[in-house]
Amino acid sequence: MADRRLQVFHTVARLLSFTKAAETLHMTQPAVTFQIRQLEEYFNTRLFDRTHNRISLTEAGLHVFEYAEKIIVLYGEMDNRVRELTGDVGGILMIGASTTIAEYVLPNLLGEFKDRCPGVQIRLKVSNSMGVVHMIEDNSVDVGIVESPVTNKNLIVEVCWHDHLVFICPPQHPLAQKSVVSVADLADLPYVCREEGSGTREVISDYLQNNSEQLGQLNICMELGSPEAIKGAVEANLGVSIVSHATVRKEVRLGTLVALPLSPALERPFSIVHQRQKFRLRAMDEFMEFAHEHCEKQAATEQQ
């Protein structure tokens, strides 16, 4: 951005928070405050009202915000057109990803994408699926990859590939010798569950409900915030769980966990999500195209 002050102002005005703006821009809060103060000195007027630890735009701030949005969009269009002529793909790409995807899917994908487009600076924000959707909604990220359905009709959702979920238990568990596990088999077993807002939890809850069971009726012994924590608890024989098959390949190979298919089978889409109205930088288009290619290759490999 030609004028860093305008970019910082636009982010603060959009989020109505100096703290959140600093996190989004990877700046310190004093640095954000300094940029805003410089812009206010330039216009010789306040752009924000600050009361009771909350901020709001002044009338002048509202006008600056309106023009800042237009300027930023035009700058993006200019950047895209020039890069199309030169064949260069660069800039900063903000990606949001749910925990499972960030830990088990994105490392290889981003590594290969970086080889194709070395000029793109990738910044990754990790949250559960609900958190990623919120980041897309408030433009904290350019594109997100989530593992649960998205209900906001203002967002475009493109399914990338389908993930299979499996039942996991320690090798010494009584169910470890079965070929498949049914919903009825889960009754009364200590169950290790993901936290509220997790895409995995939401998908499993819907699956149980469709099979005449409720998540709340399970004997939930723990609620944990990551696949790694769940695997550790199950390995320690603290309970059983249902997780993405992609998260337990290593443990199954090492023999520390047993992964069994569910009956009926349970799968979910991994989806790329972005704003319907958001101006798309070329780096964003290149990433989404590459992600679809990568996922298609991954799905073909798993079917072999």
Image (cartoon, rainbow, N blue to C red):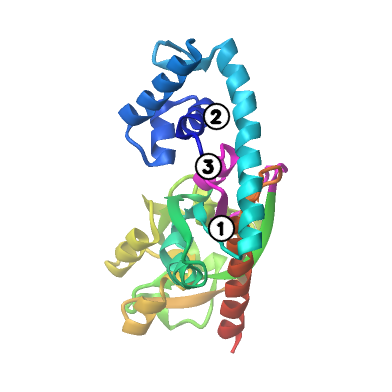
Q: Which residue is mark 3?
A: 135
Q: Position of residue 38 (x, y in %)?
A: 41, 21
From the viewer's perspective, is 118 left or right of 77? left
Disc 2 marks a residue whose amino acid type is: Arg
- Identify the element where label 3 is drawn: helix
Which of the two labelled residues, at mark 3 and mark 2, occupies the earlier sequence position?
2
Q: Which of label 3 and label 1 is nearer to you? A: 3
Q: Which residue is mark 1?
A: 147
Observer-nearest residue: 210 or 134? 134
| Span colored in magenta | 130-155
Q: Which residue is mark 2?
A: 14
- Whether residue 211 is visible, yes or no, is no
Q: CA distance from mark 3 to mark 2?
A: 12 Å
Is 30 magenta? The answer is no
Which of the two labelled residues, at mark 1 and mark 2, occupies the earlier sequence position?
2
- Identify the element where label 1 is drawn: loop
